[in-house]
Amino acid sequence: MQRGFYMDKLNEGERATVKRWHLSVICGYGLACLAVFGWIALQTEGAQSQMAKLSTVTSAQAAGK
């Protein structure tokens, strides 16, 4: 026996509301993912620049000895 979709019981207005909610949730999760990946990219870039600064200071100190 096959069950029907829950949307079959809803009228057109209710279906539009459900679709709008689904779309807003998907967009919200998408924006959250972009924010997290952007934050990680900025942190990685900052860490690399700090490592580059440490690398030049260490090599300059090593050259002076």
Image: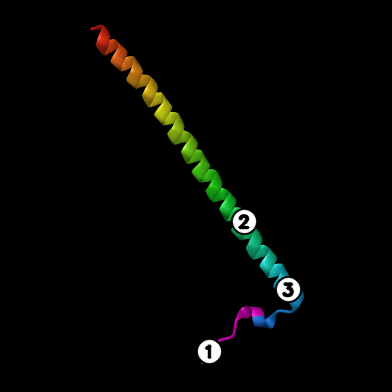
> Which residue ends up furthest to the top in the rendered image?
64
On-image quarter of the C terminus: top left
- First in sequence, mark 1 or 2: give its number: 1
- Circles 3 and 2, Cβ within 8 Å, touching? The answer is no
Tell me residue 22's x, y (percent): 63, 64
Q: Is residue 65 left or right of residue 57?
A: left
Q: Which residue is mark 3?
A: 14
User: How many other residues sit within 10 Å of disc 2, few (<14), some (14-19) or many (≥20)?
Assistant: few
Where, by quadrant of the figure, is residue 35 drawn? top right
Q: In front here: 49 or 5? A: 49
Give the foreground label among 3 and 2. Answer: 2
Above or below, comparing residue 16 to residue 3 in the picture: above
Q: Residue at x 56, y 49 (%)?
A: 32
- Mark 2 falls on what kind of element? helix
Report the residue marked by disc 2. 27
**Gap between marks 3 and 1, in whole Å?**
23 Å
Give me the residue at 70% from left, 74% from top: 15
CA gap between label 3 and label 2 equals 20 Å
Provide the major secondary structure of the magenta segment: loop
Identify residue type, mark 3: Glu
Which is nearer the N-term, disc 3 or disc 2? 3
What range of the chain is rendered magenta? Answer: 1-7
Q: Residues within 10 Å of mark 1 (few under 14, many from 20)?
A: few
Q: Amino acid at mark 2?
A: Cys
- Confirm whether the magenta stretch covers residue 5: yes
- Residue indicated by mark 1: 2
> Is disc 3 placed on a helix, strand or loop?
helix
Q: Look at 51% across and 44% down and name the residue there.
A: 36
Q: Alpha-carbon neighbours of circle 3 within 10 Å: few (<14), some, or many (≥20)?
A: few
Judged from this view, the residue extending furthest toward the bottom is 1
